[in-house]
Amino acid sequence: MKVGVFQIPPHYITDSERNKHLLSCGMWGHLGASSSIYKRMTSRDSMNSDVEADSDLLQNGVEQEMTNPSWKYSCPHVLVATIVAFLFGYHLGVVNEPLESISVDLGFSGDTLAEGLVVSTLLGAAFAGSLISGWIADGVGRRRAFQLCSLPMLMGASLCATAKTQASMLTGRFLVGLGLGVGPPVASLYVAEVSPAHVRGTCGSLIQIATCLGLMAALVIGIPVKNIVGWWRACFWVSTIPAAILAIAMMFCAESPHWLYKQGRLADAEVQFERLLGSSHVKSAMVELSKSDRGDESESVKISELLYGRHSRVVFIGATLFALQQLSGINAVFYFSSTVFRHAGVSSNLANVFVGIANLTGSVVALLLMDKLGRKVLLHWSFFGMALAMALQVFASSGVASNYGAFYFSVGGMLLFVLTFAVGAGPVPGLLLPEIFPSRIRAKAMAFCMSVHWVVNFFVGLMFLRLLDQLGPQLLYSIFGTFCVMAVVFVKRNVMETKGKSLQEIEIALLPQE
């Protein structure tokens, strides 16, 4: 998209002529309001006059013809950030195949509680990490937050790989979980803040693709575990490589200009914008930041403000989206997929491959469509497709169809569910939330919403098998389908489209300045 008007060199325009032109355009009042937002901390006073002048020019359309910034500047930084998502997927799947071997080698074979702890300890620690992720990201910056989250993942994976007892394995999983709790929210923040508006959705979709690749990598690397004694230790050692790469590569990545601006470091923010967008877009990017500047960034954000204050509506939308994402039954489908395929005589490894391909295919579709169709459209039709897939699952388990037909409906519904989830319900919430949260609360609101995600995820995983035994698959899948329908209605009524808008434009639209 190009924005351009005829420009008269400013040195040919007298002050009186300029004022007459501004008055004739009806923009004088806007200029006055724009100028007032720069009465801030003394650390920013030195740049106020330059930024105000640029703001005047931009708001009155007296600017040079501009094109969208090239995505090539920010792409390397985004790719480094997605290493966190890869590790997220890898560590969620790394114990699936090796768990039996781990239990035998560490002496708790047959103890289902101990085996469950190996899985659930990671989830509990991730919840704890997500609670503090916002404060870490705001306190030390996005880059250092990445490096901090990589340290417990390095130490935890190393401890798991060298574990001799169940206690050391659980300690390692806890450390890894802390890192995973901090990392994904920071990755969503960072990608949203460093990506140009016109490709922000595409960049955000890379997080989901990286998660899929992490899950598939864990599956592939775990295949030899039943044939090679102690191979599960290698599975954990492998994860230390991307964690180390993340810690080192972040030393060379750009810091978020949004975070630097909040700290009053305007000169540093300009330098980082130049690295991310190119020199020709620095001034316009700084002006965009100033539009949402309320002068209250130095004030601390309390949990009560997120729940009851002026930001409570967007926080409610974000937390509800994450809750509905998990209540849709995505984890239940993953848990039950191997059983469905096994009844048809298909091995669990092959079943995981089919589900992984469906997941990756949907993620690639999301990558291609996120900035073309928009977040709301993908989210709406994703939940609709998931509801339809659950209907197929209900029909398959109803006994109406023949055994052969029931298999096709069940497998087809399962793969359709995973595919449609990956198109919208999977990647969109993590991208949409940093977009709709105002800059001042963005990190802490993401931390709160991710903690909701982990809590619901934990309880769905904990209760699924028990509910399946007590209610049966037909009623349970009907409940999941109902949540998908509720999500369709919620998205239609509450979610705004953010495609192609700058973060500042979205903030102003949701929280108009008084």
Image (cartoon, rainbow, N blue to C red):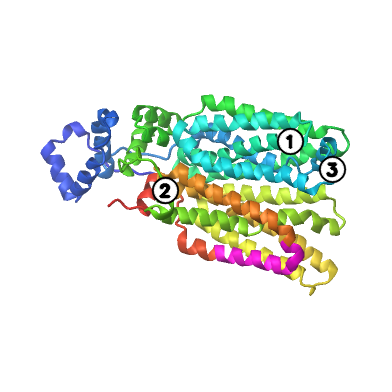
Q: Amino acid at mark 3?
A: Ser
Q: Nearer the viewer, mark 3 or mark 2?
A: 3
- Give neighbour class at mark 2: few <14, some 14-19, many 20+ (Cα, 10 Å): some
CA gap between label 2 and label 1 equals 49 Å
Residue 387, x across and y down, in percent: 63, 65
* Residue 482 is a magenta residue: yes
How many numbered marks does the figure carry? 3
**What's the mark number on residue 425?**
none
Q: Which residue is mark 1?
A: 167
Residue for point 77% across, 44% down = 114
Q: Which residues are magenta?
A: 467-487
Where, by quadrant of the figure, is residue 469 drawn? Answer: bottom right
What is the distance, in whole Å, between disc 3 and disc 1 at their CAs? Answer: 14 Å
Residue hosting label 3: 109
Q: Is residue 433 left or right of residue 44?
A: right
Residue 501, disc: 2
Q: Is residue 429 above or below residue 481?
A: above
Sequence-wise first label, 2 or 1: 1
Q: Is residue 219 above or below residue 407?
A: above
